[in-house]
């Protein structure tokens, strides 16, 4: 019997993905060469260094961010995901990890852009990956990202909407479980039991064991932000859409069976329209910025060429004078 399991923990960053990955790591799943924690995440990130570095290398130069607000962001990395060499690299890494640890949990904020790639490669190895999608109110996520990563509110909220909806869309055909972050902190045993049922996995030690390593890992004090838009500087149209998106996904979190995806599809289209309007509204501003950058670049290049020419001319005069003696 094949005992290999692969769980991918995804969702907008600062949504409790580290807490979930850590809970799985404390329940019999392995995180290969995990990144250590810091002040922004004191209990640990539970992210494999190799996976993080790989995704960073893929995204370098694309302009695509971890919590990007572009609804067409997937097209930016389409060529990367289709590269046979990329697939071979991931396959070899996964095969090697499975040889020593048949049950793996992978988590990285950039994973959403490469979800299809990991699913395809895992299936080639005969493993059907399962997903845990973490949910946390977008105002909390925005406040957390602004506090720890200096991300502007509009970018954080629009990025949350886009990545949350994308996470739902990309996992629709895979075993998955939505988990509300406050619920995980309040009663992790119930939430992990739901994950086990939805993904068909078991835990070691069993979640009914008391005490359990997860008891020491999770602390309600980890939730250092509260939901609410009073301190979040975003237009009402964006906060309203974020609220409705969160509510729709929360319905999924509370259901053990697939629900009607039409409302979420409608929200995705609404967000795409809002994004298009925003691009149109800022078009001339962006063109002015691009022109200003172009002019600044031209001036800098001309200045460098002039300095090189003057330096070359001066050097020539020195050489001629030395040659006359």
Image (cartoon, rainbow, N blue to C red):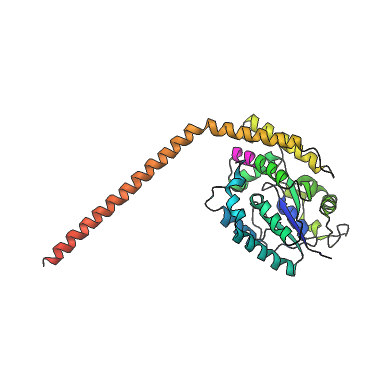
Viewer-closest of 290 and 191: 290
Residue at 55% of width from left, 34% of height from top? Answer: 279
As displayed, is residue 298 above or below residue 98?
above
Residue at 68% of width from left, 56% of height from top? Answer: 118
- Residue 10 falls left or right of residue 73: right
Q: Is residue 85 visible?
A: yes
- Residue 7 picture location, percent across and down: 75, 56
Q: Is residue 323 in the magenta section?
A: no
How many numbered dots are placed on residues in this image? 0
- Residue 176 picture location, percent across and down: 78, 49
Residue at 66% of width from left, 66% of height from top? Answer: 92
Q: Quadrant location of residue 229?
A: top right
- Residue 132 falls left or right of residue 157: right
Q: Quadrant of the C terminus?
A: bottom left
As displayed, is residue 310 above or below residue 299?
below
Q: Quadrant location of residue 275?
A: top right
| Residue lying farthest to the left in this orientation | 325
Q: Quadrant of the N terminus?
A: bottom right
Task: Considering the whole magenta stretch, tell me its main secondary structure.
Answer: helix
Residue at 79% of width from left, 58% of height from top? Answer: 216
Q: Is residue 154 in the magenta section?
A: yes
- Residue 239 picture location, percent across and down: 67, 33
| Residue lying farthest to the bottom in this orientation | 100
Q: Which residues are magenta?
A: 153-159
Q: Is residue 33 visible?
A: no
Viewer-closest of 141 and 303: 303
- Residue 235 picture location, percent across and down: 62, 31
């Amino acid at each position: 019997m094949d005992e290999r399991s692969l769980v991918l923990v995804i969702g907008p960053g600062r949504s409790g993905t580290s807490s979930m990955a850590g809970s799985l790591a404390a329940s019999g799943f392995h995180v290969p060469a995990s990144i250590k924690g810091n002040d922004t995440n004191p209990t640990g990130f539970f992210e494999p260094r190799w996976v993080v570095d790989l995704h960073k290398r893929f995204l370098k130069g694309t302009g695509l961010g971890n919590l990007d607000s572009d609804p067409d962001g997937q097209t930016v990395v389409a060529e990367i995901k289709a590269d046979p060499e990329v697939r071979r690299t991931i396959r070899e890494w996964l095969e090697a990890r499975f040889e020593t640890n048949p049950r793996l949990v992978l988590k990285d904020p950039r994973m959403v852009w490469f979800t299809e790639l990991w699913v395809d490669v895992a299936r080639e190895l005969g493993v059907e990956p399962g997903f845990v999608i973490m949910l946390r109110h977008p105002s909390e996520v925005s406040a957390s990202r602004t506090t720890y990563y200096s991300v502007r509110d509009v970018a954080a909220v629009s990025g949350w909407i886009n990545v949350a909806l994308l996470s739902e869309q990309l996992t629709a055909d895979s075993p998955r479980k939505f988990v509300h972050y406050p619920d995980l902190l309040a009663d992790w045993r119930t939430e992990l039991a739901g994950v086990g049922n939805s993904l068909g996995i078991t835990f070691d030690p069993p979640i009914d064991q008391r005490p359990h390593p997860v008891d020491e890992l999770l602390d309600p004090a980890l939730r250092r932000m509260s939901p609410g838009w009073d301190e979040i500087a975003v237009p009402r149209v964006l906060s309203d859409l974020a609220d409705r998106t969160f509510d729709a996904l929360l319905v999924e979190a509370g259901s053990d069976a697939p629900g009607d995806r039409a409302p979420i599809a409608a929200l995705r289209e609404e967000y795409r329209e809002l994004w298009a309007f925003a691009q149109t509204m800022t078009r001339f501003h962006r063109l002015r910025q691009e022109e200003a950058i172009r002019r600044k670049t031209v001036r800098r290049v001309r200045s460098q060429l002039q300095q090189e020419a003057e330096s070359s001319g001066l050097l020539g005069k020195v050489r001629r004078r030395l040659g006359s003696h």
